[in-house]
Image (spheres, rainbow, N blue to C red):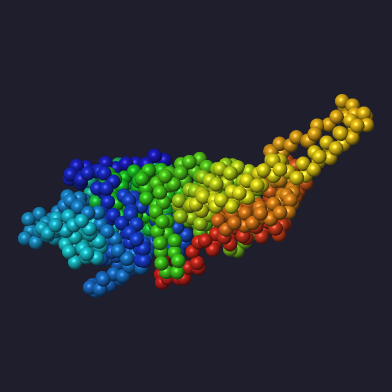
Amino acid sequence: MPETVIKPTASTTPGVARRATDQSLIRSITPRGGQPVEVGAITAIVGPNNSGKSETLRDILRLAANFDPSTMDRSSEEEPRPVVLNDLNFVPKLSIERMLHGLKIIDPNSSEGTIVQGIGPDLKTPQQRAISRELQNILYRPVMNAKSVWASSLGDLMRLRISYVGSNDRKRLVASTLAASPLQGPENLLQVLHYADANLHQGLTDAFAAAFGGMQVRLDTSERITLSLRVAREFPKALADPIEQVRQQQQLHRIDQEGDAYQSFVAIVLTMLLGQGRVILIDQPEAYLQPSQARFLGRWIAANASGLACQVFVSTGDVAFLQGLAEGAPSLTILRTERKDDITSFHSIPHEATRALARFPIFATQDALRLLFCDGAVVAAEADDQIVYETVANRLPTSNNIGFIHAAGARNVGLVTKVMRQCGLPVCTVVELDVLQNEKELSDLVQAASGSPPPQPWLATRDRLAKHVEGWFDEEAIAASANEVESFLDQIKGETASPAAAKPLATETTGSQNWAKLRHERLEWLPRELRMWVEELLEDLKRKGIFVSPKGRLEAWIETGSQDRRVWINQAMQLLHQGQCPTELQTFVKDLITHLNSAGSPTRSARTGNRT
């Protein structure tokens, strides 16, 4: 589904630039006990459940507009109390034109300043504010944090510069309502839509049709005193007789008689179309939508935010929506939340990591963005490895939010691991013994998993193993060669040797053959002293999140007697499905999960209310 792009009319864009920095009003947010975190023109807040995603949006509203969406009685002068955040910083040196963009000017020459009118942050409270002449001085402060502007004229104006759509607000925002005079302050989105430009009405219709297979939605004003949104596959031509027109419209379904998906989608699109110049906070925008619809909504928001001069914050737990957002906004800012006790921290994911997850084939074909909502990730080398380990993990009670991904080959494990760490995810990798075959590949993997190069003793052990496997000082091979030399000399002395009987002095063995032998016979093939060094190295790697399978190859975990890998994986899956999992395999996977759980957050205590 192609995204529909709205082109605001000249009257709604008075001299406002279209750079991403110009659509932003908020520069950074500061979590409790942490440092400021930069935000973007479009910022997605993701992470595991109950890690503070939704509460972050409510805190932005509390701090930016001194407005608490969870407080029923707002007559009190008591300041709102943020839960996750401590403060936020506005973009410095904003222009007056930028701050007035999208607002209705009632009186530009009032003695109190310019009088503007609009709808409040909750999208149901009419607001009217006087913009004093000191506002320009406030806007040019080099640093503007939330609490410093609460008592200023900018603090008053911010209630008209921010909109919040909570998870329970959608139906209210599109419900039928009484019409209002154009001189009266609007009390809801439908009253704003009533007097909006025709291109915004068309923008709503186009977006709805693209998301829902050609269905249309329109504002019905035929009753004059009541406003309703009507939904139809095709709308009939308007009738000249007002009574007949009302009756005709009443044959069509109101949107509040339709499903939740219609109502949620329209509420979000209307909030943006009618909130030009605002900070838009949307909690769980994907609610009630099918994956294709959620993905389209993400693309639509990304395509239209700049043209509408909206800075958008979304809290989401949906892969399809996030995929659409990432596809439509190359500079998307993703903040991953993590909660320890009652403190939420934010990890800003680099743009290159976001692009990799959304577009690079290894990640995109596995919906790797889903891992951002997990408590940790396991990286396997091949698809078969992932299937086996994930199947075992799914039967463990401690692995309910651990994600699995494969690297499409052992050589890519380091790359995938590095991207996972860039995303702030606890991660561990599962590899085979031949990871020790190449020093550079081992070093790259350790660097990717831990952020540091391997210590020299690790490389020395790897080098000693490689020399043994590749026959540089293979004691058994040397002893065998010595026996052959002695036998050959005896034959010469006895003059019993013949050309056919003459054997080469040593059996030639290639390194690749010996590595294959190590994979099949495992560490037991090594001399005792060398085996002890290698086992110690494997334990050191495990502490860094690199788990080397002690079986040498995947098939050794479950012996089925088949030499064909395709037949084996089918038989192995049947056995695991029947609950016949070898104890060693189950223990190995438990160790993976334990490592990730210990690397992630401790048990989250419950906060009051919905703190997702």
Q: Residue 525 appears at what percent x and percent y?
A: 74, 49
Residue at figure coordinates x 46%, y 44% from the top left: 356
Q: Residue 600 appears at what percent x and percent y?
A: 50, 61
Residue at figure coordinates x 62%, y 57% from the top left: 539
Q: Nearer the viewer, residue 563 or 482?
A: 482
Question: In the rendered view, would you say 296 is above or below 337?
Answer: above
Residue at figure coordinates x 41%, y 51% from the top left: 349
Labels in figure, total: 0
Q: Is residue 383 left or right of residue 196?
A: right
Quarter of the image that includes the C terminus: bottom left
Q: Is residue 63 visible?
A: yes
Q: Nearer the viewer, residue 124 or 343?
A: 343
Q: Nearer the viewer, residue 489 or 355?
A: 489
Q: Is residue 279 visible?
A: no
The quadrant where residue 36 appears:
bottom left
Q: Is residue 428 left or right of residue 30?
A: right
Residue at figure coordinates x 40%, y 49% from the top left: 350
Q: Residue 200 appears at what percent x and percent y?
A: 27, 46
Q: Nearer the viewer, residue 353 or 60?
A: 353
Quarter of the image that includes the N terminus: top left
Q: Is residue 329 left or right of residue 141?
A: right
Question: In the rendered view, would you say 555 is above or below 47?
Answer: above
Q: Residue 514 appears at what percent x and percent y?
A: 71, 41
Farthest front residue in view: 493
